[in-house]
Structure formats: C-alpha cells, structure tokens
Image: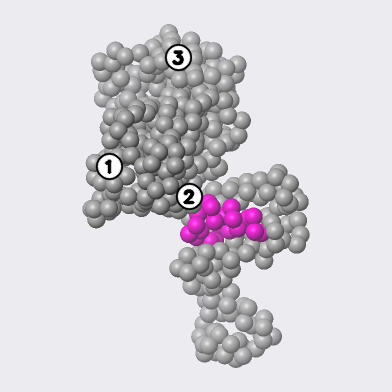
Amino acid sequence: MADIQKQTVVIADNDPDFLDWSSKHLEAESVEILTTVSSEEAIKLFEEKGADLLIAEFNLRPIEGLELLKKVRLSHPNAMVILNGQINSTNAVIESMRLGAFDVLRRESINFELRQVAEQALQSAEQMKVAADTVDSEPITPPQASDDLIIGRSPAMQDVYKLIGRVARADAPVLITGESGVGKEVVSNAIHKFSRRAKSEYVAINCAAIPSNLLESELFGHEKGAFTGAVSQRVGRFEQCDGGTLFLDEIGDMPLEVQSKLLRVLQSGEFSRVGGNQTLQSNVRILAATNKQLEDEVEHGTFREDLFYRLNVVRIHIPPLRRRLEDIRLLAEYFLQKQTAEGKHRAMQFSNEAIDMLESYNWPGNVRELENLVQRACVLASGNVLLPTDLPFDQVGSGKEGRSKLEYAAYRFINAAKDEAITPVEIAMRELVQVALSKVEDDEAAAAKFLGITKTELKKHLHSTVAGDST
C-alpha cells in the first residue's frame, strides 16, 4: 500500500467470507493482516500486536462495534478504527465519528471504498507515530439519543454526518452552507446535541427576520433608556446561552455594524449591552448558516472579511435534495409517518407512481418543500394510498421557483432515460404519439394534426419507438 515499515491490520467480522475477501483485498508486502470473528479476540490481537488499524463490523459479538470502538479508543486515543455494516441509523454514523472512528463504510459500498480508506488510515497511523503528540485527550462520553436527528442515507449525507461527529468534539465555529430548505438548522441542532454543551442552552436566531435596528439588542441586550422603547434592561442572547450554543441563521443578512460587534465576541468573548459601558464575558459556541456565497458578499463589501474567516473555521455544506435522490423516498415516508403519528391523519402510504413523481421533481425548496407537500397531500387525499393526482404540485412554489405540470413530465422523462437505451426526447415523443393515437382511435393523420407534425414525422417517431423498445 505504501513504502513504509510493516504495519498490522486487524479485521473483525461475523462473516468468514468477508474476512477472506477483505484480507485478500488489502493484501500487500508492507501489511500483516489478522482476522477474527470475535470482538474480544480483536481487542486481544490489537493489544498484542500493537496494530495500526482495526476494521470492525457494527454487529460483532460479544462486544458490538460502537462499544468496541470505545474500548479501543479509551486505551489508545489515536487508534485507527474503521467501522462497517448495514447502517440503518444516522445516529450510528454520527456516534462513530464522534467517538473517533477514522471512517464508517456502508456494507453495500465497501467493495469500492475499503482499500482506499484503509490506505489513508494506515498513512495516518504512521504519521501519528512520527508526530510528537504528548497531550492525552480524554474521550468524550456521548449523549444518548433515541431517535435520528437527521433523515437521509445518501453518500452525500453520510459525509455530512461524519463532519457533524467530528466538529461536535470541539468548540470551533462552524459555517453551515446550502440552499434554502436543505436543513441547516437541523444540522446545527445535531452539532449541539452531540457536543459537550448538549445540556446547556441552545438558541437559534434568524438574522434576516429581525430588523437591523433591533438585532444588536437581540444579541447583546440593552440598558434601560438605551433607545426609545427601552423601558427596562434586557439580557441578550449571548448572556442567555453562556456556556451553550448560539445558532445564527442567515448570517449573510447581518448588518455591518452588528458584524463588527460579533467579531469582537468571537475574538475575545467580550461585549457590551446597547447603551451600556460594562464589559461582559460570554462563553458561547457560534454556529452560523447562510444560503449566500459569503466570499461574494466579502468581495462586494457587504460582509466583513475578518468575520468571514472567523466563522469559516469548519464548513459543512448540505447538498440540495435534487443531488441526493436516494433520500427523497425516505424523507417522504418519514414525513408521512410523522403526520400519522401526530394523529392529524389516518394511516397512509405512497403508491409507486407517486414516489416516481416525487423523485422526478427537482425540489427548488428542498426538504422544507417536500415536507410541506406531504402535509398538503395528506389533507387533500381522498384515500389511504397517495396517488400522483394527490400530490399538489400545482401549489408548489411561485414565480421563478414554480414548476408546471409539463416541467414535471420533463423531469420524469429525463429520469426514465437513465434506464433506457434511447434519449429523453425519444421517450417524450413515444409517450406523446401513443397518447395522441389513443385520443383519435389510432387515426395517424388526426394524431399528426393533433401534435402539430406531419404524418411522415409521426411515422418516423413510431418507427423510432419500435426500434428503441427492441434494444
């Protein structure tokens, strides 16, 4: 794998076939590979051999994967551990990364990822040995969570979960970016819930929703008489969540004068109430979110460059829903169950055609739009099964974000083309010709007139359709 001294890898898994495959897959002159079906034996081998990497399955016995990770990392804080398995809980990914796992691999993709990730882990292990790290880091005890905080199993969201797990261990500012409606506040809440500040205050502020002349008072408080209407002293959010987490949503809309005061807090932890002379201290972790390109705002002079660098210590970008189609059905069914669980509607389910339509849409409003659509569908549906006709797409969005029924059809054609040997245009023409012929009782001349094409063109599309279907 690399021109380094002999390194040892311990692989622990319930499946002997996987042990055989993975040991051959990772075979190299510079690596010694040891395998076992027992988690207790894995710990013993890791200790005796001073192993560089442990690859373990979540469902090991008698000690399951997360507990095995805890034990190994407790005695070896820098141990490289890769967990893998059938992952049905996003919390498992977050917990694993928070506890120090090098990576978490889904079983269905491990064939493609294992070697590369293992090489990276071994390189990191070698670097750890060389580094003069004399600080002992005490493992953080993770909080217990009964339900997943975030819904989604796409590879893009797996990366988000891993980042949440890593940043939850520290107090550095985090900048969360992504389009409107992707779930930036949900990610912020997850970071807080898995952090050492989880039992302290969490406050969320939408900087775009508060008038600029009141935002400073909202954040830092004010003294009595500081301005017209300030009839008493007010404690601001920085005082309120001292020791906790403050989430600043839509940070790109914060006025420049407030940005200056926020910068001071980030640099020194000090601030003053509006109209006050007393210097106050606050130990608050800042999480910020925006759907704007702050680099552009800096260039245009509407956002302070020094504040941008203070906030952009770690960036978590949440991909739009159209980039993670695997999550659409999962999210839709979650929102449907949520409506039922809250007692608002009878038990319902989606038809396959309805799911196809959901997956064909490009979701400009992202997850928020999907949740709203499911809620409306539950209100409008007449039966227990949600059909395409029950999905109120004509009510989704407005203006440039609105989508016509014809545009939905276009998305469906393009998605269908992924599994066909013909192009989206041919698929569209096939459907149009067939519908037109059905309307005029297979009269080709009438169908051509209905479509606004010649009879020769219609015959050409019919011939192309047959050829395409036969491939």
Relative to 201, say whether 207 is above or below: below
Label 1 sits on what residue type? Ser
What residue lies at 25% left-to-right and 46% top-to-bottom?
304
Q: CA distance from mark 3 to mark 1?
A: 42 Å
Range of magenta residues? 358-377
Tell me which label, 3 or 1, sits earlier in the chain: 3
How many labels sit on residues? 3
Label 2 sits on what residue type? Val
What residue lies at 34% left-to-right and 40% top-to-bottom?
274
Closer to the camera, 289 or 56?
289
Label 3 sits on what residue type? Leu
What residue lies at 62% left-to-right and 82% top-to-bottom?
436
Q: Nearer the viewer, mark 2 or mark 1?
A: 1
Coloring scheme used = one colour
Q: Secondary structure at mark 3?
A: helix
Where residue 260 is drawn, which disc sits there? 1
Closer to the camera, 94 or 72?
94
Residue 369: percent from the left, percent from the top?
54, 56
Q: CA distance from mark 2 to mark 1?
A: 29 Å
Q: Is residue 198 left or right of residue 221?
A: right
**Quarter of the image where the N terminus is located:** top left
Q: Is residue 369 magenta?
A: yes
Residue corresponding to mark 3: 74
Helix, strand or loop for the magenta stretch, by majority: helix
At label 1, counting other C-alpha atoms closer than 10 Å, the crowd grade (few under 14, some 14-19, many 20 or more) is some
Q: Secondary structure at mark 1?
A: helix
Where residue 182 is drawn, which disc sits there? 2
Q: Secondary structure at mark 2?
A: loop
Q: Nearer the viewer, mark 3 or mark 1?
A: 1
